[in-house]
Image (cartoon, coloured by chain):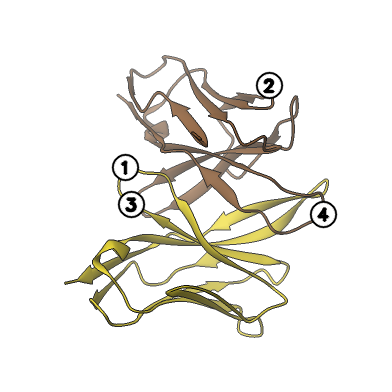
Chain colours: A yellow, B brown
Amino acid sequence: DQQVKQNSPSLSVQEGRISILNCDYTNSMFDYFLWYKKYPAEGPTFLISISSIKDKNEDGRFTVFLNKSAKHLSLHIVPSQPGDSAVYFCAASGYSGAGSYQLTFGKGTKLSVIP
Amino acid sequence: NAGVTQTPKFRVLKTGQSMTLLCAQDMNHEYMYWYRQDPGMGLRLIHYSVGEGTTAKGEVPDGYNVSRLKKQNFLLGLESAAPSQTSVYFCASSYSEVGVAKNIQYFGAGTRLSVL
């Protein structure tokens, strides 16, 4: 059963507008959440993260919102730029035993920013 | 600063052949991971290591073995390749404190493997 879900496989947005990418999770034990960005033929790169004790974290054009009661997080990109076109993965950190944590990834959302 | 380096970048194998994928990191990270990415499946954890000389199974470990003889290197082995192992393989590393959920992983560029 998928513990981290990104229900929109793709999203198209006009340049300059807001992009909103959504992610839902089922495991209430997840403590930390991350967003990764991936260009074709490259590895995922860390974008932004948020602890479960916060509801918002901002870094430049990127903001992540966390709603723990709804088990939902979202990534907002404002304003969107053509260079933001990539696949975005949501990930959640959960305890895996012996003091260590693992990441569980969603399937990704492909964002296309149209000039 | 290279970060996480994976070799090779591409490989084609015949069914039954064996190979080893190498991952090297220069960030002095304790934790290292191997993932596979298949179309529509996201990233799935194969094996991971929390330190030199240690390994553990992830979500999809069958058909793979790993070794962490040196802190900076993490090897993924396929003893007898199968077409189902055709995938893109990513290595990652992280600095993670014991008992702390913050686990920012840094990824290599990937190895694209085809098994015919």
Q: Residues within 10 Å of mark 3 (few under 14, many from 20)?
A: some
Quarter of image, res A69: bottom right
Name the side, left or right, on which B72 lies relative to B20: right
Quarter of image, res B57: top right
Q: Amino acid at mark 2?
A: Lys
Q: For mark 4, what is the residue?
A: B99
Q: Secondary structure at mark 2?
A: loop
Q: Secondary structure at mark 4?
A: loop
Label 4 marks a residue whose chain is B
Q: For mark 2, what is the residue?
A: B70
Q: Residues within 10 Å of mark 4 (few under 14, many from 20)?
A: few
Q: Are marks 3 and 1 in contact (CB under 8 Å)?
A: yes
> In whole angstroms, how far apart are the C-alphas of marks 1 and 4?
34 Å
Q: Residues within 10 Å of mark 1 (few under 14, many from 20)?
A: few
In the depicted structure, whether residue A48 falls above or below residue B113 = below
Name the side, left or right, on which A110 lies relative to B22: left
Q: For mark 3, what is the residue?
A: A39
Q: Amino acid at mark 3?
A: Tyr
Label 1 marks a residue whose chain is A
> In whole angstroms, how far apart are the C-alphas of marks 3 and 2?
30 Å
Location of residue A77 in the rendering, given as x and y in whole percent from the top left corner:
39, 75
Q: Secondary structure at mark 1?
A: loop
Q: Amino acid at mark 1?
A: Ala
Location of residue B92 in the rendering, given as x and y in whole percent from the top left corner:
55, 40
Q: For mark 1, what is the residue?
A: A41
In the depicted structure, whether residue A12 falls above or below residue B61 = below
Q: Residue at x 37, y 55 (%)?
A: B40
Are labels 2 and 1 assigned to the same chain? no
Quarter of image, res B59: top right
